[in-house]
Image (tube, helix red, strand yellow):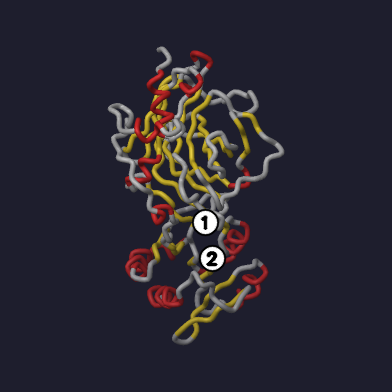
Amino acid sequence: MVWNPLRLLKTLVHFEVAGPLSQGLRWLPGMNDSGIAMTELNASSLVPAPPEQRLWLLAEAAERSPALIQGLAALGYGVTTETLEPDQALVNVPLVVCDELGLEPLLEQLQHRTIYQQATLIDFRQPDPAIAALWGSLDDGVMGGVSTSQVQWQEGLRFVGKVSTANSGGFASIRTRNIEPPLNLGKWQGTVLQVQGDGQRYKWILRDDPGWDSLAYCRSFDTDAALPSSVRTPFLEMVATRRARTVPDASSLNPARLYSMQLMLSKFEYDGELNPAFNAGSFELTVQSLGVYRQGPKPIVVVPQGREDLSNSLAEAGLTGVIPQGQGFAVIGATKKLPLEVNPAAIKAIFEILG
């Protein structure tokens, strides 16, 4: 393989770093490999979608899930009966139902389990054309290397290609052009990528400055060739770098003004250290969606009738419960009011269905 100057020109044109020539060259044959017309990005395309709230059913209560699914769907709630690992977070679960025998272990579990609110920012399986047009290849050809990559749209955003260490190269990446106005994710703690990888270690990169060579805030993540994975990246844990060298005195990433996003496969980690999972040759990473997350409140525990004695245990665990009372219900435990995320009609429906 030899260095291809045409690929370098395509890169400069796509990312609008070829000066005044970028706009004119963009429409020349062969300059747009994706075939996607450059369209103006609608700001509404980059607003986190309201997530579905789910009711978590445990033990014998799970047997009533079909009735609860039907009864709660109209109120905007889903139902899950999945079994979670001890260190696995609860995501978008404002209500938990457990039978009599499992109540005490449940309170202990909820006291220590991480709770997240999560929302989808971009569903890459059905991308807005303007979002798809943002992405382009940025490989080591910009420094004389011969690695090549492409963005494909098949069941998500597919980052594919061949990476080579020839000519002192060794990285391939895809990056967005600058987003204007910048993306404001200041109300969130980090991003979540749903990915299917090939067993290699990749980098997720964000920038809070529009400059082409501005600081790149990175986080490496490993993939499994056999299983999809969820990659949760806290903004505060992203490392400020410039050309794979860390910048220790740099400020933290500002998520309230994000200008660009990037995915990279590189033989290097940071500061000259090698990527331990790197393999030269063909690679493939598919991203189904990009989401955002933040710490959420503890879920409300649905308590069986006659267990008012659990009020103190709930309060000590920092939890709130609801219990049937007359034709309605009472709130017990840490607080006496329901959080705004919980619809009282949903709780009434749960008690009616469970009897």
Can I make out residue 47 in this image? yes
Q: Which residue is mark 1?
A: 90
Q: Residue at x 45, y 32 (%)?
A: 19
Q: Which residue is mark 2?
A: 299
Chain-order first, disc 1 or disc 2:
1
Q: Is residue 68 above or below residue 51?
A: below
The amino acid at mark 2 is Pro
Q: Say whether residue 38 is left or right of residue 17.
A: left
Q: Say which element carries label 2.
A: loop
Q: Say which element carries label 1.
A: strand
Can I make out residue 98 in this image? no
Asked where in the image residue 82 lies, by quadrant, the reply is: bottom left
Q: Is residue 278 above or below residue 233?
A: above
In x, y percent, where is residue 217? 58, 39
Could you say which disc has been placed on residue 81 in the image? none
In x, y percent, where is residue 11? 42, 29
Q: Residue at x 42, y 26 (%)?
A: 283
Q: Determine contact: label 1, label 2, CB under 8 Å.
A: yes
In x, y percent, where is residue 1? 40, 12
Q: Is residue 140 above or below residue 320?
A: above
Q: Quadrant of the C terminus?
A: bottom left
244 or 158: nearer the viewer = 244
Q: Say whether residue 346 is left or right of residue 339.
A: left
- Structural crowding at the residue carrying mark 2, measured as other residues with C-alpha within 10 Å and reported as few (<14), some (14–19) or many (≥20): many
2 or 126: nearer the viewer = 2
In x, y percent, where is residue 348? 43, 78
Residue that sits furthest to the bottom in the current view: 326
Residue that sits furthest to the front in the current view: 20
Q: Is residue 254 above or below residue 329?
A: above
